[in-house]
Image (tube, rainbow, N blue to C red):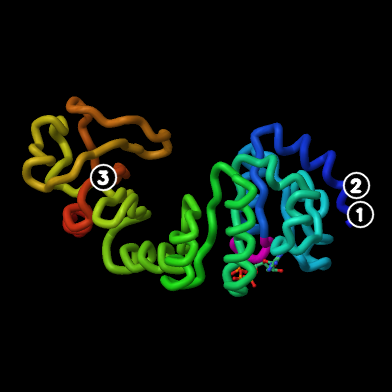
Protein backbone atom coordinates (compact mmCIF):
# COMPACT_ATOMS: atom_id res chain seq x y z
CA UNK A 1 0.00 0.00 0.00
CA UNK A 2 3.00 2.29 0.45
CA UNK A 3 2.95 3.35 -3.19
CA UNK A 4 -0.49 4.94 -2.76
CA UNK A 5 0.70 7.31 -0.06
CA UNK A 6 2.66 9.04 -2.81
CA UNK A 7 -0.63 9.86 -4.46
CA UNK A 8 -2.84 10.54 -1.47
CA UNK A 9 -1.63 14.10 -0.84
CA UNK A 10 -2.27 15.03 -4.46
CA UNK A 11 -5.66 13.28 -4.32
CA UNK A 12 -6.61 15.23 -1.21
CA UNK A 13 -5.61 18.46 -2.93
CA UNK A 14 -7.69 17.56 -6.00
CA UNK A 15 -10.64 16.61 -3.80
CA UNK A 16 -10.71 20.13 -2.40
CA UNK A 17 -11.09 21.69 -5.85
CA UNK A 18 -14.02 21.42 -8.30
CA UNK A 19 -13.29 17.77 -8.83
CA UNK A 20 -14.61 14.31 -9.61
CA UNK A 21 -13.09 10.87 -9.09
CA UNK A 22 -13.73 8.52 -12.02
CA UNK A 23 -13.28 4.81 -11.32
CA UNK A 24 -12.84 2.76 -14.49
CA UNK A 25 -11.25 4.34 -17.53
CA UNK A 26 -12.85 2.21 -20.25
CA UNK A 27 -14.54 3.91 -23.22
CA UNK A 28 -17.28 5.43 -21.09
CA UNK A 29 -15.17 6.44 -18.07
CA UNK A 30 -12.40 7.92 -20.20
CA UNK A 31 -14.79 9.94 -22.39
CA UNK A 32 -16.47 11.27 -19.24
CA UNK A 33 -13.16 12.06 -17.55
CA UNK A 34 -11.78 13.90 -20.59
CA UNK A 35 -14.98 15.91 -20.99
CA UNK A 36 -14.85 16.91 -17.32
CA UNK A 37 -11.23 18.00 -17.77
CA UNK A 38 -12.08 20.05 -20.84
CA UNK A 39 -14.79 21.88 -18.92
CA UNK A 40 -12.38 22.79 -16.13
CA UNK A 41 -13.11 20.10 -13.55
CA UNK A 42 -10.15 18.31 -11.97
CA UNK A 43 -10.26 14.55 -12.35
CA UNK A 44 -8.73 11.71 -10.38
CA UNK A 45 -8.86 8.64 -12.63
CA UNK A 46 -8.51 5.15 -11.18
CA UNK A 47 -8.20 1.90 -13.08
CA UNK A 48 -6.73 -1.49 -12.33
CA UNK A 49 -5.18 -1.72 -15.80
CA UNK A 50 -1.60 -0.46 -15.82
CA UNK A 51 -1.43 0.23 -19.58
CA UNK A 52 -4.63 2.26 -19.45
CA UNK A 53 -3.33 4.24 -16.48
CA UNK A 54 -0.12 4.98 -18.37
CA UNK A 55 -2.05 6.17 -21.40
CA UNK A 56 -3.96 8.74 -19.31
CA UNK A 57 -0.90 10.07 -17.57
CA UNK A 58 -0.83 13.83 -18.20
CA UNK A 59 -4.35 13.79 -19.67
CA UNK A 60 -6.18 13.77 -16.33
CA UNK A 61 -5.18 15.72 -13.22
CA UNK A 62 -4.05 12.49 -11.63
CA UNK A 63 -4.37 8.90 -12.71
CA UNK A 64 -3.60 5.95 -10.50
CA UNK A 65 -3.61 2.20 -10.82
CA UNK A 66 -5.69 0.54 -8.12
CA UNK A 67 -8.41 -1.98 -7.41
CA UNK A 68 -11.49 -0.06 -6.32
CA UNK A 69 -13.03 -3.11 -4.66
CA UNK A 70 -10.50 -2.70 -1.84
CA UNK A 71 -11.45 -0.24 0.86
CA UNK A 72 -7.84 0.55 1.77
CA UNK A 73 -7.14 1.55 -1.83
CA UNK A 74 -10.09 3.97 -1.86
CA UNK A 75 -9.00 5.43 1.46
CA UNK A 76 -5.34 5.71 0.43
CA UNK A 77 -6.36 7.53 -2.73
CA UNK A 78 -8.56 9.83 -0.64
CA UNK A 79 -11.60 8.89 -2.72
CA UNK A 80 -13.69 9.36 0.44
CA UNK A 81 -12.72 13.06 0.35
CA UNK A 82 -14.39 13.61 -3.03
CA UNK A 83 -17.97 14.78 -3.03
CA UNK A 84 -18.64 13.32 -6.49
CA UNK A 85 -17.49 9.89 -7.63
CA UNK A 86 -18.39 8.05 -10.84
CA UNK A 87 -18.22 4.26 -10.99
CA UNK A 88 -17.64 3.65 -14.70
CA UNK A 89 -17.25 -0.12 -14.45
CA UNK A 90 -19.92 -1.95 -16.42
CA UNK A 91 -18.73 -5.32 -17.61
CA UNK A 92 -17.47 -6.56 -14.27
CA UNK A 93 -20.76 -6.28 -12.40
CA UNK A 94 -19.32 -7.66 -9.19
CA UNK A 95 -16.53 -5.06 -9.14
CA UNK A 96 -19.06 -2.32 -9.87
CA UNK A 97 -21.36 -3.37 -7.01
CA UNK A 98 -18.52 -3.84 -4.53
CA UNK A 99 -17.05 -0.46 -5.42
CA UNK A 100 -20.42 1.29 -5.15
CA UNK A 101 -21.17 -0.25 -1.76
CA UNK A 102 -17.74 0.78 -0.44
CA UNK A 103 -18.31 4.34 -1.64
CA UNK A 104 -21.67 4.39 0.12
CA UNK A 105 -20.02 3.03 3.26
CA UNK A 106 -17.42 5.81 2.98
CA UNK A 107 -20.33 8.26 2.79
CA UNK A 108 -19.37 9.81 -0.55
CA UNK A 109 -22.17 12.41 -0.94
CA UNK A 110 -22.90 11.92 -4.66
CA UNK A 111 -22.26 8.65 -6.45
CA UNK A 112 -22.95 8.06 -10.12
CA UNK A 113 -22.70 4.52 -11.44
CA UNK A 114 -22.96 3.04 -14.89
CA UNK A 115 -25.23 0.01 -15.23
CA UNK A 116 -24.64 -2.69 -17.80
CA UNK A 117 -28.28 -3.82 -17.81
CA UNK A 118 -31.59 -3.46 -15.90
CA UNK A 119 -30.66 -6.07 -13.29
CA UNK A 120 -27.32 -4.41 -12.56
CA UNK A 121 -29.05 -1.03 -12.38
CA UNK A 122 -31.70 -2.30 -9.97
CA UNK A 123 -29.03 -3.60 -7.58
CA UNK A 124 -27.17 -0.28 -7.71
CA UNK A 125 -30.43 1.59 -7.05
CA UNK A 126 -31.33 -0.73 -4.16
CA UNK A 127 -27.89 -0.18 -2.64
CA UNK A 128 -28.65 3.52 -2.60
CA UNK A 129 -26.45 4.80 -5.45
CA UNK A 130 -27.70 8.31 -6.13
CA UNK A 131 -27.58 8.31 -9.92
CA UNK A 132 -27.66 5.14 -12.00
CA UNK A 133 -26.95 5.64 -15.68
CA UNK A 134 -27.62 3.32 -18.61
CA UNK A 135 -25.41 4.70 -21.41
CA UNK A 136 -26.23 2.05 -24.02
CA UNK A 137 -29.97 2.22 -23.37
CA UNK A 138 -30.02 6.03 -23.30
CA UNK A 139 -27.93 6.31 -26.45
CA UNK A 140 -29.99 3.62 -28.21
CA UNK A 141 -33.21 5.50 -27.49
CA UNK A 142 -31.71 8.78 -28.53
CA UNK A 143 -30.44 7.43 -31.84
CA UNK A 144 -33.82 5.76 -32.44
CA UNK A 145 -35.45 9.19 -32.32
CA UNK A 146 -32.82 10.63 -34.66
CA UNK A 147 -33.23 7.74 -37.10
CA UNK A 148 -37.03 7.93 -37.03
CA UNK A 149 -37.63 11.61 -37.38
CA UNK A 150 -36.41 14.91 -38.59
CA UNK A 151 -34.71 15.89 -35.33
CA UNK A 152 -31.15 17.18 -35.66
CA UNK A 153 -30.53 16.29 -32.04
CA UNK A 154 -32.65 14.80 -29.36
CA UNK A 155 -32.57 14.36 -25.59
CA UNK A 156 -35.14 12.61 -23.44
CA UNK A 157 -34.95 14.63 -20.21
CA UNK A 158 -37.07 12.11 -18.33
CA UNK A 159 -39.24 9.26 -19.57
CA UNK A 160 -42.00 10.93 -21.58
CA UNK A 161 -40.52 14.46 -21.72
CA UNK A 162 -38.02 15.54 -24.36
CA UNK A 163 -36.01 18.27 -25.96
CA UNK A 164 -35.19 18.28 -29.67
CA UNK A 165 -33.26 20.44 -32.12
CA UNK A 166 -35.17 20.67 -35.41
CA UNK A 167 -35.52 22.91 -38.46
CA UNK A 168 -38.47 25.31 -38.07
CA UNK A 169 -41.47 23.94 -40.05
CA UNK A 170 -43.35 26.28 -42.43
CA UNK A 171 -46.51 26.45 -40.27
CA UNK A 172 -44.71 28.44 -37.55
CA UNK A 173 -42.57 30.68 -39.79
CA UNK A 174 -43.21 34.30 -40.71
CA UNK A 175 -45.38 35.38 -37.77
CA UNK A 176 -44.48 36.03 -34.12
CA UNK A 177 -44.41 32.80 -32.12
CA UNK A 178 -47.00 34.25 -29.76
CA UNK A 179 -49.51 34.27 -32.64
CA UNK A 180 -48.86 30.72 -33.83
CA UNK A 181 -50.72 29.05 -30.90
CA UNK A 182 -47.94 26.49 -31.05
CA UNK A 183 -48.44 25.36 -27.45
CA UNK A 184 -52.20 24.87 -27.81
CA UNK A 185 -51.98 23.23 -31.26
CA UNK A 186 -48.86 21.14 -30.85
CA UNK A 187 -48.23 20.89 -27.09
CA UNK A 188 -44.64 22.05 -27.36
CA UNK A 189 -42.68 25.16 -26.47
CA UNK A 190 -39.97 26.76 -28.60
CA UNK A 191 -37.16 27.46 -26.15
CA UNK A 192 -34.41 28.85 -28.39
CA UNK A 193 -33.57 29.76 -31.99
CA UNK A 194 -30.43 29.83 -34.12
CA UNK A 195 -30.52 31.66 -37.47
CA UNK A 196 -27.82 31.22 -40.10
CA UNK A 197 -24.41 31.51 -38.55
CA UNK A 198 -25.73 33.47 -35.58
CA UNK A 199 -25.59 31.70 -32.23
CA UNK A 200 -28.50 30.53 -30.16
CA UNK A 201 -30.79 32.93 -28.34
CA UNK A 202 -33.88 32.41 -26.21
CA UNK A 203 -37.19 32.56 -28.03
CA UNK A 204 -40.14 34.62 -26.81
CA UNK A 205 -43.60 35.58 -28.04
CA UNK A 206 -42.20 38.19 -30.44
CA UNK A 207 -39.68 35.82 -32.08
CA UNK A 208 -40.34 35.39 -35.81
CA UNK A 209 -38.89 32.25 -37.37
CA UNK A 210 -37.54 32.12 -40.92
CA UNK A 211 -36.82 29.28 -43.34
CA UNK A 212 -33.71 27.36 -42.29
CA UNK A 213 -33.84 28.49 -38.67
CA UNK A 214 -32.97 25.80 -36.16
CA UNK A 215 -35.10 25.68 -33.05
CA UNK A 216 -34.99 23.89 -29.71
CA UNK A 217 -38.37 22.51 -28.75
CA UNK A 218 -39.43 20.98 -25.42
CA UNK A 219 -42.52 19.05 -24.44
CA UNK A 220 -44.02 15.59 -23.99
CA UNK A 221 -42.10 13.09 -26.14
CA UNK A 222 -45.13 12.25 -28.31
CA UNK A 223 -45.74 15.95 -29.06
CA UNK A 224 -42.05 16.63 -29.73
CA UNK A 225 -41.90 13.64 -32.09
CA UNK A 226 -45.05 14.67 -33.95
CA UNK A 227 -43.86 18.27 -34.33
CA UNK A 228 -40.43 17.14 -35.53
CA UNK A 229 -42.13 15.37 -38.45
CA UNK A 230 -43.68 18.62 -39.79
CA UNK A 231 -42.04 20.28 -42.79
P1 LIG B 1 -16.58 0.59 -21.47
O1 LIG B 1 -17.79 0.15 -22.26
O2 LIG B 1 -16.72 1.92 -20.86
O3 LIG B 1 -15.28 0.39 -22.19
P2 LIG B 1 -16.79 -1.84 -20.10
O4 LIG B 1 -18.05 -2.05 -19.36
O5 LIG B 1 -16.66 -2.54 -21.41
O6 LIG B 1 -16.54 -0.32 -20.21
P3 LIG B 1 -15.38 -2.76 -17.89
O7 LIG B 1 -14.75 -4.09 -17.99
O8 LIG B 1 -16.62 -2.70 -17.15
O9 LIG B 1 -15.54 -2.24 -19.32
O10 LIG B 1 -14.37 -1.77 -17.22
C1 LIG B 1 -14.21 -0.44 -17.47
C2 LIG B 1 -12.86 -0.12 -16.86
O11 LIG B 1 -12.92 -0.34 -15.46
C3 LIG B 1 -11.73 -1.00 -17.39
O12 LIG B 1 -10.70 -0.17 -17.87
C4 LIG B 1 -11.30 -1.83 -16.19
O13 LIG B 1 -9.90 -2.04 -16.15
C5 LIG B 1 -11.74 -0.96 -15.03
N1 LIG B 1 -12.03 -1.75 -13.84
C6 LIG B 1 -12.79 -2.86 -13.76
N2 LIG B 1 -12.80 -3.32 -12.51
C7 LIG B 1 -12.04 -2.47 -11.77
C8 LIG B 1 -11.65 -2.41 -10.40
N3 LIG B 1 -12.05 -3.32 -9.53
N4 LIG B 1 -10.84 -1.40 -10.00
C9 LIG B 1 -10.42 -0.47 -10.88
N5 LIG B 1 -10.73 -0.48 -12.18
C10 LIG B 1 -11.54 -1.47 -12.62
Query: Which of the 4 image quarters holds residue 3?
Result: bottom right
Who comes first in sequence, dot 1 or dot 3?
A: 1
Pointer 1 with pointer 2, Cβ within 8 A: yes
- Nearer to us in this view, 121 or 196: 121
Alpha carbon separation for disc pair 1 and 2: 6 Å
- Comparing labels 1 and 3, the label whose residue is closer to the camera: 1
Q: Position of residue 191 (x, y in %)?
A: 28, 37
x 15%, y 42%: residue: 172
Dividing the image into four quarters, tell me where ligand 1 lies: bottom right
Distance from the alpha carbon under mark 1 to that under mark 3: 51 Å
Disc 3 from disc 2: Cα separation: 49 Å
Judge left or right: residue 137 versus residue 167.
right
Residue 84 as seen in the image, left or right of residue 60: left
The residue wearing badge 1 is 3
**Residue 209 falls within the magenta-colored stretch:** no
Position in image of residue 204 (x %, y %): 23, 28
Identify which residue, 109 or 164, lies in the foreground. 109
Tag 2 secondary structure: helix
Magenta: main secondary structure equals loop
- Name the residue carrying label 2: 6
Question: Looking at the rendering, which quadrant does residue 24 occupy?
Answer: bottom right
Badge 3 crowding class, 10 Å Cα cut-off, few under 14, some 14 to 19, many 20 or more, is many
Residue 175 placement, left or right of 64 = left
Label 3 sits on residue: 218
The residues colored magenta run 24-28
Q: Position of residue 177 (x, y in %)?
A: 16, 33
**What residue lies at 32% left-to-right and 44% top-to-bottom?**
214
Find residue 218 and report its horizontal and vertical position in percent: 26, 45
Residue at position x 82%, y 53% from top?
57
Image quarter where the N terminus lies is: bottom right
Amino acid sequence: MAKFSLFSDTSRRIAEADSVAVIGLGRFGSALAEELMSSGTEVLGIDRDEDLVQSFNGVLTQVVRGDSTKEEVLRQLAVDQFDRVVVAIGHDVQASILTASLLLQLKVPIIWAKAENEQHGRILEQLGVHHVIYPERTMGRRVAHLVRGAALDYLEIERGYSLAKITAPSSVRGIPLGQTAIRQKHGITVAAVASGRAGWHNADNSTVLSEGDRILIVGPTVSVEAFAQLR
